[in-house]
Image: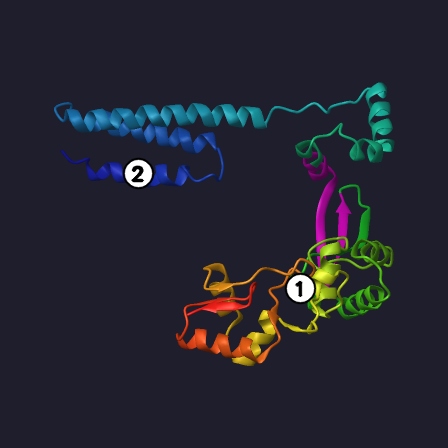
Amino acid sequence: MLIPRRSRPFNKVMKLLRRPINNNSNVYACLAALAERQFNQVDPDNRLVAAELERRWEQALRELKQAESLQAQRHTPSSATLLSPELKTALMTMGQKLPQIWSSDVLTQVQRKALLRCLIDKVVIHRLQRDQVHIRIIWKGGDNTNGDLSIPVGSLAELTNGEELAARIIALARQGFKDDDVAAQLIAEGFRSPMGLTLLPSTVKRIRLDHRIFQQRSQSHPRHIEGYLTVSQLAKMLNISKHWFYDRIHNGTISIARDEKTQLYLFPDRPNTLTQLKRLQAGQIKHLRFSEEYQDV
């Protein structure tokens, strides 16, 4: 059975009261009276309707009681909290020792954040450069702290002094300084990596290698070894990929050992070497062996 139309105003009032606007007990009292009147007017034979209206009446009475309780608490005068002289002294002493406490392990990360929320009113950030911002911290006591802060960027080109950093790394690397020494020197001069607050030796190494400045022989193999041809040289002479050689060396089609000194695959620098490799490429022979200078057809 449907609820009578006269109960619809009750629904509208309930929706409004569920909005967190106020806790006026007079409004809840009117609502409870409305629910009571609707319950008293319903036909007792309509049991479903009567049960629903009784439930709404009880709900209105509960909300009225809660509103009266909240209103009573709001009008209760609050007593000001007075600090004892001992507690005031303790708080002032803690304030003077806060830098030492902050740098120690006494406070957890959660406690530090909670303390900052109590002390800071707001933080204003202004971007000066792509890699630098200006920060102004306004404390709840009225003071403010200002400072510039470096922030991470995605590449060396986004650093304000990126070109100067690269030039200093190149100059020091060409003088023979190691990557760790270059990084330490440039950190002292105020340089840093794009993604960090310090200069990493890996950043120094990457910039050094980009400019082909090598510190170890293994980083730069000689382009020409007297009496031999490297894989790169043969690949260029035959106009084929270096992977063509490495693939056939690994599957045993080309038998050759690495040179112990250079750790390279060195082929004899003879016309017959190119001829046999061309025949292998054309499928005329199936196997080449250079360690003992013969090939299997």
Q: Which mark is residue 155?
A: 1
Give the quarter of the image for residue 196: bottom right
Give the residue type that dot 1 points to. Answer: Ser
Image-based side of 229 in relation to 48, left or right: right
Quadrant containing the C terminus is bottom left
Residue 99 in picture, x, y percent from top left: 83, 36
- Nearer-the-camera pick, 77 or 102: 102
Question: Is residue 114 in the magenta section?
Answer: yes
Image-based side of 174 in relation to 20, left or right: right
Residue 69 in picture, x, y percent from top left: 50, 23
- Nearer-the-camera pick, 21 or 4: 21
- Would you name the residue on which mark 2 appears? 11
- Nearer-the-camera pick, 164 or 126: 164
Image-based side of 130 in relation to 148, left or right: left
Give the quarter of the image for residue 287: bottom left
Image-based side of 44 in relation to 10, left or right: left
Give the quarter of the image for residue 59: top left
Earlier in the chain: of badge 1 and badge 2, it is 2
Number of numbered callouts drawn: 2
Of helix, strand and loop, which one carries label 2? helix
User: Which residue sits at x=73%, y=60%?
Assistant: 205
| Mark 2 nearby-residue class (10 Å; few <14, some 14–19, many ≥20) | few
Question: Is residue 146 in the magenta section?
Answer: no
Residue 232 in picture, x, y percent from top left: 59, 72
Q: Which residues are magenta?
A: 113-139
Q: Are marks 1 and 2 in contact (CB under 8 Å)?
A: no
Chief SS of the magenta region: strand
Residue 13 in picture, x, y percent from top left: 35, 39
| Mark 1 nearby-residue class (10 Å; few <14, some 14–19, many ≥20) | few
User: Which residue sits at x=41%, y=31%?
Assistant: 28
Between circles 1 and 2, the one closer to the viewer is 1
